[in-house]
């Protein structure tokens, strides 16, 4: 029997409902495979602002650092729009505090959900199975910010070092080695010096991975290619801001954002696992949220941080089974299917572990 400490950041909006759903499924895994998962609830985001006056209390950082991994729901919402410190600041802060410099987002089109994709059948005939590897703690979101005193201009700095590009590049090449051995590095090297450095560094790094084919693509073309021929991609590696945008696009193509997980990793085994969507305040507390993205995030945690590949597979298979049985939350519902709520969906997946 193995024991793992998991910090739970339920967060705001639908966060508590979807994390509760994932815990139900983890408990089923624990019962079937005999592992012990010890959960600790911690506050971050809007709920932390309400309780502690800050989106990221030190206690949250300490508990997350002492855990084997973190499972996060989502943070934010209109309630905190006027706050000096926004809930999302907690998110950037915890990634930095845990040294999570890479974000891995698999976008897989499940055959059961083909009708949920906005793309036409002909564009999806070869499927979609892309892993977007996004740099997470550098670039413009963390660069120097400046504002004119009179409010007439503002600027943000995009800056990357060779070391930052190399470490995210390694994650991408190693991920590709376990998949289709193809990496597309996305940049804007025709305009930006930071992208020229990015491209040069990726090209150099590729020499250490002779089995992997590296190609480069400008970000505007990458967005177009994702929309017109998504099957061409295996692994995409890109900067923080380009990854933010492209990973939302690749996930939209795969159907609902309610289906897609992500993993944020650093140098160690401890990672933070979360759905790619936000706190969906429009449906919070109504039992309408799709818990699958969070449940699949928990599966990624088992595989990538705890080395429990068989258990992760059991979760993925249980999700497929429940979809095959025709159960759908409202975001992925189509005629003839069985409409179900967030709690029931999680329960069904747990029962099928
Ligand atoms: P969102 O992802 O919360 O919602 C976009 C749309 O998708 C909404 O219509 C929502 O109902 C739907 N949706 C999202 N998740 C769903 C799920 N699991 N099941 C069914 N439908 C789902 O994005 P938004 O509306 O732009 O942002 C809402 C808040 O979330 C904002 O405060 C934003 O800053 C925050 N946010 C947080 C994170 C995070 O915590 N990692 C990420 C993105 C946005």
Image (cartoon, rainbow, N blue to C red):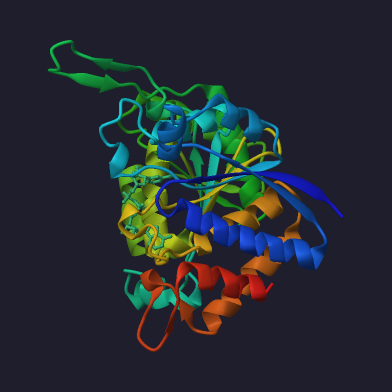
Residue 92 visible, this angle: yes
The residue sitting at 13% across, 12% down in the picture is 150
Residue 234 visible, this angle: no
Q: Is 327 situated left or right of 312 in this image?
A: left
Residue 183 on image: x %, y %: 54, 48
Determine the residue located farthest toward the bottom in the rendered image: 336
Question: Is 252 placed above or below 83 here?
Answer: below
Q: How many marks?
A: 0
Question: Is 118 placed above or below 170 here?
Answer: below
- Say which of 78 and 236 sits in front: 78
The residue sitting at 81% across, 48% down in the picture is 3
Residue 241 on image: x %, y %: 38, 37
Q: Quadrant of residue 180?
A: bottom right
Determine the residue located farthest toward the front in the rendered image: 51
Look at the image and tell me in which quarter the N terminus lies. Answer: bottom right
Q: Is 147 situated left or right of 37 in this image?
A: left
- Say which of 72 and 115 sits in front: 72
The residue sitting at 63% across, 41% down in the picture is 271
Q: Is 263 situated left or right of 231 in this image?
A: right
Residue 322 on image: x %, y %: 56, 78
The residue sitting at 72% across, 64% down in the picture is 29
Determine the residue located farthest toward the right in the rendered image: 1
- Say which of 29 and 317 sits in front: 29
Question: Is 234 placed above or below 49 here?
Answer: below
Residue 293 on image: x %, y %: 51, 59
Question: Is 230 placed above or below 40 here?
Answer: below
Look at the image and tell me in which quarter the C terminus lies. Answer: bottom right
- Say which of 309 and 61 sits in front: 61
Q: Is 112 situated left or right of 174 in this image?
A: left
């Amino acid at each position: 029997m193995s024991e793992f400490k998991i910090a739970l950041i339920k967060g705001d909006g639908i966060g508590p409902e979807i994390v509760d759903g994932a815990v139900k499924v983890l408990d089923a895994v624990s019962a079937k495979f005999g592992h012990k998962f010890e959960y600790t609830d911690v506050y971050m985001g809007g709920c932390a602002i309400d309780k502690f006056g800050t989106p990221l209390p030190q206690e949250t950082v300490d508990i997350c650092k002492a855990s084997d991994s973190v499972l996060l729901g989502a943070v934010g919402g209109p309630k905190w729009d006027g706050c000096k410190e926004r809930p999302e600041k907690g998110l950037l802060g915890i990634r930095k505090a845990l040294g999570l410099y890479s974000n891995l987002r698999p976008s897989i089109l499940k055959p059961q959900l083909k009708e949920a994709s906005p793309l036409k059948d002909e564009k999806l005939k070869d499927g979609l199975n892309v892993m977007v590897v996004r740099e997470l703690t550098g670039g413009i979101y963390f660069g120097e910010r400046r504002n004119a005193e009179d409010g007439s201009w503002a600027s943000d700095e995009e800056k990357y070092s060779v070391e930052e590009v190399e470490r995210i590049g390694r994650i991408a090449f190693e991920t590709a080695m376990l998949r289709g051995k193809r990496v597309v590095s996305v940049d804007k090297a025709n305009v930006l010096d930071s992208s020229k450095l990015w491209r040069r560094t990726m090209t150099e790094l590729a020499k250490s991975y002779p089995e992997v084919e590296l190609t480069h693509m400008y970000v505007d073309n990458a967005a177009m290619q994702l929309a017109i021929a998504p099957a061409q991609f295996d692994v995409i590696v890109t900067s923080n801001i380009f990854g933010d945008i492209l990973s939302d696009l690749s996930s939209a193509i795969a159907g609902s954002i309610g289906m897609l997980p992500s993993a944020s990793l650093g140098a160690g085994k401890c990672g933070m696992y979360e759905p790619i969507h936000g706190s969906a305040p429009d449906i919070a507390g109504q039992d309408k949220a799709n818990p699958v993205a969070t449940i699949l995030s928990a599966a990624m945690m088992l595989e990538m941080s705890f080395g429990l590949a068989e258990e992760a597979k059991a979760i993925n298979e249980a999700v497929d089974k429940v979809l095959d049985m025709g159960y759908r939350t409202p975001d992925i519902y189509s005629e003839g299917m069985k409409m179900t709520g967030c709690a029931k969906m999680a329960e069904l997946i747990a029962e099928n572990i």
